[in-house]
Image (cartoon, rainbow, N blue to C red):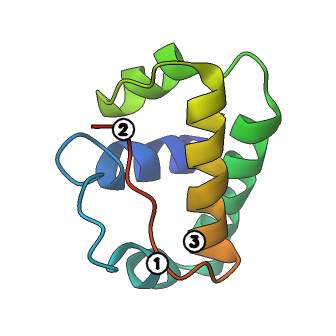
Amino acid sequence: MDERFERFVKGYLNMMEGYDTSGYLRPTLMGFNESFVEAVRSGFAQALADESFGPAEYEGLTDIEFPDRETLRSYLQAMYDYLFNGAPEQPMPPG
């Protein structure tokens, strides 16, 4: 997993920041340089495709628990869609 993707997830999707769905995340990401944005995009795509990336790995980065791989994958796909495909709202991780 790319270090820039991990840094983004740790910094912006952690227990403190991950529940702030006020809409700042997409503009914040797009404020980084193009190679960083592309690394984050690739990281999400890789995490979605990698069967070995599951709730334990995500919790290790963010301290946020997911009940199962399906719930995590749905959240990651929704986050990808929010960040890169123009989805209107940032998804909320499980409470």
Instruction: Look at the image and tell me in which quarter the C terminus lies.
Output: top left
**Dot 3 alpha-carbon crowd within 10 angstroms: few under 14, some 14 to 19, many 20 or more:** some
Callout in the foreground (2, 3): 2
| Residue indicated by mark 3 | 82
Residue 90 in picture, x, y percent from top left: 44, 68
At numbered mark 2, what does the secondary structure look like: helix, strand or loop? loop
Q: Which mark is residue 66?
A: none
Residue at position x 34%, y 80% in the image: 23
**Dot 1 alpha-carbon crowd within 10 angstroms: few under 14, some 14 to 19, many 20 or more:** some
Q: Are marks 1 and 3 in contact (CB under 8 Å)?
A: yes
| Residue indicated by mark 2 | 94
Q: Specify whether 62 is left or right of 6.
A: left
The count of marks equals 3
Please state which amino acid type lies under the numbered disc 2: Pro
Residue 72 in picture, x, y percent from top left: 56, 33
Residue at position x 22%, y 40% in the image: 15
Would residue 40 be seen by someone viewing this image from the given angle? no
Q: Are marks 2 and 1 in contact (CB under 8 Å)?
A: no
Instruction: Point out the tag, 2 or 3, that comes first from the N-terminus.
Output: 3
Callout in the foreground (1, 3): 3
Relative depth, front residue between 41 and 83: 83
Q: Which mark is residue 26?
A: 1
Q: Is residue 56 above or below residue 23?
A: above
Q: Specify whether 86 is left or right of 89.
A: right
Instruction: Look at the image and tell me in which quarter the N terminus lies.
Output: top right
Q: Is residue 87 above or below residue 64?
A: below
